[in-house]
Amino acid sequence: MTKRILFLLLFYIISITNAQTNPKVTIDSLVNNYIKELQSQKIDTICIYEKYCVGSIKAYDLSPSEINDFCFEDFPNDPVYIFWIKKGRKYLTKISICNGYGESLDDDNIFWHFYFPNQSIIKEEKIKRFTYKGSKNDIYHLMVDHSCHQNFKILIGNQIIEKRFDSFNLKREDNSKVNINYDHNVNLRSKRVVDILEKTTSQAEKNNTFKKIKSR
């Protein structure tokens, strides 16, 4: 496989000169419309999972044939994944700026089996900021502009539970500054949720689970 590294500037130039999608379409609007469609079917148990990095450069390992089908508008809009339960069966799909994907059965996914017994705990959990002690035991908070994020939102009936993880807050230390909230954050039940969702979506991508049904 020929390795092709595509940088931000290249994506930006090509996406302007060879636009493949309606520029008015946004990932948020596509997700909202999909959720409304599920809810119109009386589906009331839904999970939305997203991951993205701020201020980073992406590299893709693409074959020549994949490059021809690669959609550049997906670059600044990482896909969003939707999980839901319908009549006892578990499903998932992928939302993308460039393409529409069909739904896939997901009965083997342990996500819902973990979530429901821990729902009340997850609801009350708080992700704490990167915090360290100074030389005089003063407490300081640390943050960065460029970081990666994993977020999930659970919609069950009229209840919404949302958790947002900044990967910087999950670091044990940074430049010799020790994060005193590290153990708290990495042992949250909600952290276990994002780990399961990430493993599930990564495996689904690897297995080509998401089948394209249309181009936008």
Image (spheres, helix red, strand yellow):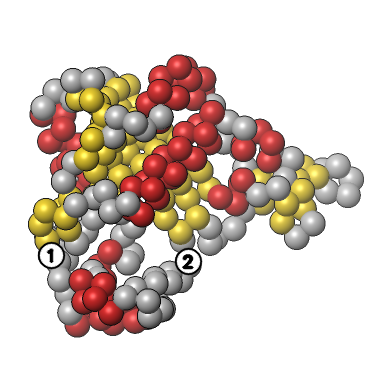
Q: CA distance from mark 2 to mark 1?
A: 25 Å
Query: The C terminus appears in which quarter of the rendering?
Result: bottom left
Residue 101 seen anywhere in this rendered image of the structure: yes
What residue do we see at 28% from left, 64% from top? 74
Q: Is residue 99 left or right of residue 122?
A: left
Query: The N terminus appears in which quarter of the rendering?
Result: bottom left
Q: Position of residue 114 (x, y in %)?
A: 45, 24
Residue sitting nearer the eye, 23 or 196: 196
What residue do we see at 53% from left, 57% from top? 147
Residue 4 seen anywhere in this rendered image of the structure: no
Question: Quadrant location of residue 59?
Answer: bottom left
What residue do we see at 17% from left, 79% from top? 18
Q: Position of residue 190 (x, y in %)?
A: 50, 32
Q: Earlier in the sequence, mark 2 or mark 1?
A: 1
Residue sitting nearer the eye, 82 or 201: 201
Q: Residue furthest right?
A: 136
Say the numbered circle drawn on residue 100: none
Q: Which residue is mark 2?
A: 55
Residue sitting nearer the eye, 157 or 49: 49
Q: Around disc 2, counting alpha carbons within 10 Å, would you say few (fewer than 14), some (14 to 19), or many (20 or more)?
A: few
Above or below — where is 178 with respect to 107?
below
Q: Position of residue 73 (x, y in %)?
A: 25, 67
At label 1, which amino acid type do we have?
A: Asn
Q: Which residue is mark 1?
A: 22
What residue do we see at 29% from left, 22% from top? 156
Helix, strand or loop at disc 1? loop
At label 2, which amino acid type do we have?
A: Gly
Residue sitting nearer the eye, 47 or 202: 202
Above or below — where is 117 with respect to 164?
above
Question: Quadrant location of residue 152?
Answer: top left
Q: Is residue 100 left or right of residue 163?
A: left
